[in-house]
Amino acid sequence: MQIMKKILPLLVVCTFLGGCKKYLTTVPQDFITPQNYFTKEQDAVLALNAAFDELSRQWYYAGYWQARMVESCDDVYCTLTGQYPANHQALATDPSFASTWQVLYEAIERCNVLLANIDKVDMDATKKGYIKGEALFFRAYCFFFLVDQWGPIPLKLKPTADANDISIPRSSVADVYAQILKDMTAAEELVPTTALGDYGGAGYPAKTTVQGILARVCLTMAGDPLNDKTKFEDARKWAQKAVDSKEHGLNPDYTDVFIKMISNQYDKKESMWEVDMVDIPGKTEHGYLGYLNGISCPLADTGNCAGQVRATRLLYNLYNAKDLRRDWNIAPYYYVASGSTVTRSYMSSTALYDRFPGKFRLQYTPFPRTTGRSPVNFPLLRYADVLLMLAEAENETNGPTTLAYSCINQVRARAWGKLLPGATNPTESNLTAGMDQASFRQAIQDERCREFPSEGLRKHDLMRWGIFFSTLQKMKNDVTNTALPAVNSSLKQIIINISDNATPKWRYWPIPANELSLNNAMTQNPGW
């Protein structure tokens, strides 16, 4: 791979010590190689830290990937008018594709080097198993991201030994998923039940994390493009394991889930895996969550936000008026500055394409606050997702059973405030009983939209359900429907363009030009 050729010089220095985040306190200055580096436990821990550090890179979960590459669906949409992936105007040469590809394969290379050398480390066997399991899981997660966005990809399972050996052909989608399942299943047996200490925390997977992501992988395999319906049963099994562990539960207050996340309080009961961010001036370890896709605000102390993403009327109308998620996920106001203070400016009740996503409100970040970036961790897996995946898999396997209803109704009860002290009429939020399988499937799809806007899951869901392009057409139909309140003309045109530009080639992203030029075995995706 071309990216492997870039990082082969000074391999270990770049690979293990270049990830120095808040985990690392000292940096050795001597030149080291894989052959002489892996001797003691700390070496393996630093190598694992360096691999997971890739998650917080600018073109991965730091924020650009979400706000500028995938945030244009029926829940929220990017308002940038240039050539961006999110509005389906980017060219194959757009650097965002190459940067994301590069980060993912750098992470895979770091995992490969660690896995190739972990057995020579003199350390406790159980702890060694933890590290091996987390490396296997993370490598598989990177492959999952790659195959989801690019389709067939090079399946690189060994560290680069020769900088000239970079012509690796693409493996089929089925083969990539087979390797993902193999790695994650092995990891599930190795990683600790509770992620703690040097081997865990917000940014590291525990056993239930692996189980939850395995459920996501299996649901994806059951949908487009593989359509392997046998994987619904596997998804049900993995999600059920995570639930049965009793390690997790719903925070009774939906808004508190995100206030805790924003204020750097890790709540492992609800939030099962996060990308660990830090905000260091001059570094790229910070994120953009809540800055690019939050409530527009010009001042740092109140939560500076560029407001590049807006919510949709389709999302707003999915919520019942009693659903407390609505006015948290879709803010009815934005901030206007007057000197060093800001005031809220409320929007018209009909301006439902003008409103900003409100889920990640930077006013709750710890001081000192800055402009132009965000320290907020990116949520990769929440317990609510596990419950909804279990409901979906159960419905597809056995129909809308009592279990399926129980899972979705738990999420809905929290959303309507029924888990808060003093709540009345506890069953008011329940789905209507007696649905058939198709109706329950639609209920799950709608509930996921209500629960997860701005968390980077909607496009993935729509793609695996095979309804991404038809859903974008519904957005266009909504803004051009003269029977509905008129939409701001510039925002209307943005949404029309997002829909019209989403030709079939956008099922997958283009292979980066540098990869095509250096990897003779590589081919381009259709339409690019």
Image: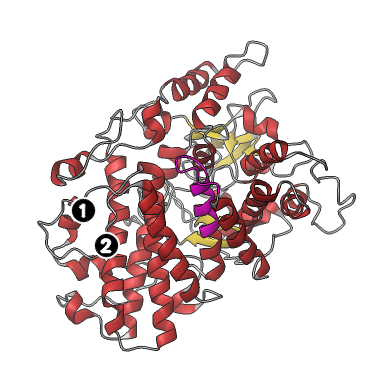
Whichever of callouts 2 and 1 sits on the residue coming sooner in the sequence is 1
Identified at 52% across, 19% down, the residue is 492
Q: Which residue is label 1 attached to?
A: 3
Q: Nearer the viewer, residue 338 or 485?
A: 485
Q: Nearer the viewer, residue 488 or 191?
A: 191
Residue under the point 36% across and 77% down? 45
What's the residue at 35%, 50% (across, down)? 58
Q: Position of residue 145 (x, y in %)?
A: 40, 50
Residue farthest right in this picture = 425
> Label 2 to label 1, Cα distance in Å?
9 Å
Mark identifier at residue 209: none
Q: Is residue 299 above or below residue 129?
A: above
The magenta-colored residue range is: 213-229
| Secondary structure at numbered mark 1 | helix
Does the magenta segment cover residue 223?
yes
User: Does the rendering let one see residue 280?
Assistant: no
User: Which residue is under mark 2?
Assistant: 109
